[in-house]
Image: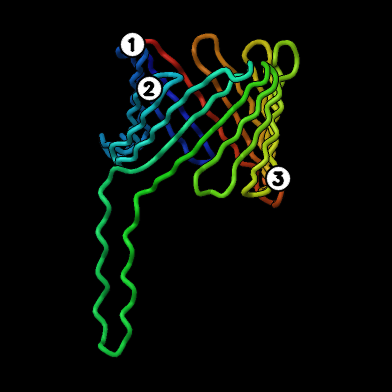
Amino acid sequence: MKATVKGRYEGDKATAAATLALSAAGDLRLRASATDAAFAAGPSLDGLTLTLEKPGSFLLDLKPNNQDVRFQFMNSAVVLDKKVSLTYTHSTSLAPKPAAIPAPATSPSAAPPPAPKAAAPPNRTALDLSIAFDPANKVSVSHALGSGGCRVKYSYAHGAGRLTTLEPTFDTAKNAWEFAVARRFDGGDAVRGTYQASTKQLGLEWTRSSSIGGSFKVATTFDLSDQSKAPKLVAESTWNYEI
């Protein structure tokens, strides 16, 4: 059994999360994840997620508190000597649909107001397709059904060790570009920079992986559209254990 503990500090807010994972029959894996919300006011189902997974095949997430469910199916094949991967993701809620509240009574001469509509459970479906032309070049396309657009990302890993990665992304719905540059170093250090043209958000991130099963990350975000705003700082620490 494996356990993961993660702490996150963002401004004046600190959060924590823990995950327990164990291997089931065959390649199946079971995971239980909980955030600090599950223990803030005594044990509860808030922040609890149960996951059944077969890596490279499917994943099922269930949040018992609000009965949100996420299905994910993955498959890959070699087409014309190129690896093609397809991921289908569908999220929905198993919670019963709330009944519509009747409209209040009005005078006979007044026109009756429209009855409020019951909120429909959220349903989201997304498709992700990636084509690896070679170890250094890959193109990915992501589309959420009903969004009216898609995200196209090109990934280029430079050098013999593929230590530097360039990733320009174009969002057709927003008609905007995003750029990311990442560099890995010997010893477990990595840096990453991102820029979103539509919001003018510049992000910088540094990560260090430990040989004893942990990692530490510091990230900051600058709003270049309003330089009077202070940068947003986030620090994360993750530790992995064998039980």
Q: Which mark is residue 145?
A: none
Q: Tell me how far mark 3 sits from mark 1, CA to CA.
A: 45 Å
Say if mark 2 contacts mark 3, CB within 8 Å.
no
Q: Earlier in the sequence, mark 2 or mark 3?
A: 2
Number of numbered discs visible in the structure rendering? 3
Name of the residue lying farthest toward the front: 80
Which label sits in the foreground, 3 or 1?
A: 1
Q: Which mark is residue 26?
A: 1
Q: Earlier in the sequence, mark 1 or mark 2?
A: 1
Q: Which quarter of the figure is the N terminus placed in?
A: top left
> Crowding near pointer 2: few (<14 within 10 Å), some, many (20+)?
some
Q: Tell me how far mark 2 sits from mark 3, CA to CA.
A: 36 Å
Task: Looking at the picture, tell me which residue is in the foreground, 75 or 237.
Answer: 75
| Left or right: 238 as drawn, with respect to 113 | right
Amino acid type, callout 1: Gly
Which residue has dot 3 on it?
Answer: 197
Secondary structure beneath disc 1?
loop
Residue 228: horizontal and vertical position, in percent? Answer: 69, 51
Secondary structure beneath disc 2?
strand
Which residue is painted at 38% across and 35% down in the image? 70
Which residue has dot 2 on it?
Answer: 53
Residue 54: horizontal and vertical position, in percent? Answer: 39, 19
Q: Tell me how far mark 1 sits from mark 2, CA to CA.
A: 11 Å
Amino acid type, callout 2: Glu
Which residue is painted at 33% across and 84% down in the image? 111
Amino acid type, callout 3: Ala
Residue 90: horizontal and vertical position, in percent? Answer: 41, 38
Which color scheme is applied? rainbow
- Using the rendered view, name the quadrant where residue 163 is placed: top right
